[in-house]
Amino acid sequence: MHQSNFLKWVLLAICLIAILAGVFQIGKLVGLALYSNDFSITSIKIWQVGLISSGIWGVFEFVRTMKKLKVSPKYN
């Protein structure tokens, strides 16, 4: 396997972890908003916003890297 392809696969794994963390935080916040009487927008912490942002980054980077893997030249 070509080294740059290996790095792309590592990047895909990192993107998947970021996506999972972002989806988990969105689900947690939606659950709190629906079922908790104490929830307010001001109770959202900066690290939660960071995890959601990294999840959004992960989606776009995952799609971009998958496109690169499909277009990359074949090595014999």
Image (cartoon, helix red, strand yellow):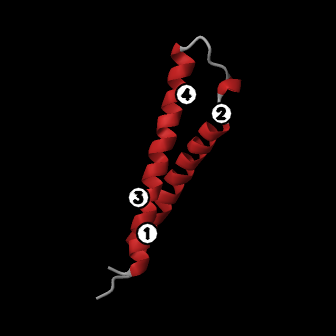
The CA span between labels 2 and 3 is 26 Å
The residue wearing badge 4 is: 29
Query: On the image, numbered disc 3 is attached to which residue?
Result: 13
**Which of disc 1 and disc 4 is earlier in sequence?**
1
Label drawn at residue 8: 1
4 in relation to 38, above or below? below
Q: Secondary structure at mark 3?
A: helix
Pinpoint residue 44: horizontal percent, then vertical percent: 65, 29
In the rendered image, which residue does mark 2 sit on? 45
Q: Nearer the viewer, mark 4 or mark 2?
A: 2
Circle 2 or circle 3, nearest the eye? 2
Cα distance, mark 1 to mark 3? Answer: 9 Å
How many neighbours does mark 2 have within 10 angstroms: few (below 14), some (14-19), or many (20 or more)?
few
Determine contact: label 1, label 3, CB under 8 Å.
Answer: no
Amino acid type at image mark 3:
Ala
* Side of 76 relative to 52 (left or right): left
Looking at marks 2 and 3 on the same chain, the residue that comes earlier in the sequence is marked by 3
Mark 4 secondary-structure assignment = helix
Q: Can residue 72 be seen in the rendering of this structure?
A: no
Q: Quadrant of the C terminus?
A: bottom left
Amino acid found under the numbered disc labelled 4: Leu
Image vertical order of residue 16 relative to residue 73, above or below = above
Q: Can residue 39 be seen at all in this image of the molecule? A: yes
| Crowd tier of the residue under label 1, counting other residues whose Cα lies within 10 Å: few below 14, some 14–19, many 20 or above | some
Amino acid type at mark 1: Lys
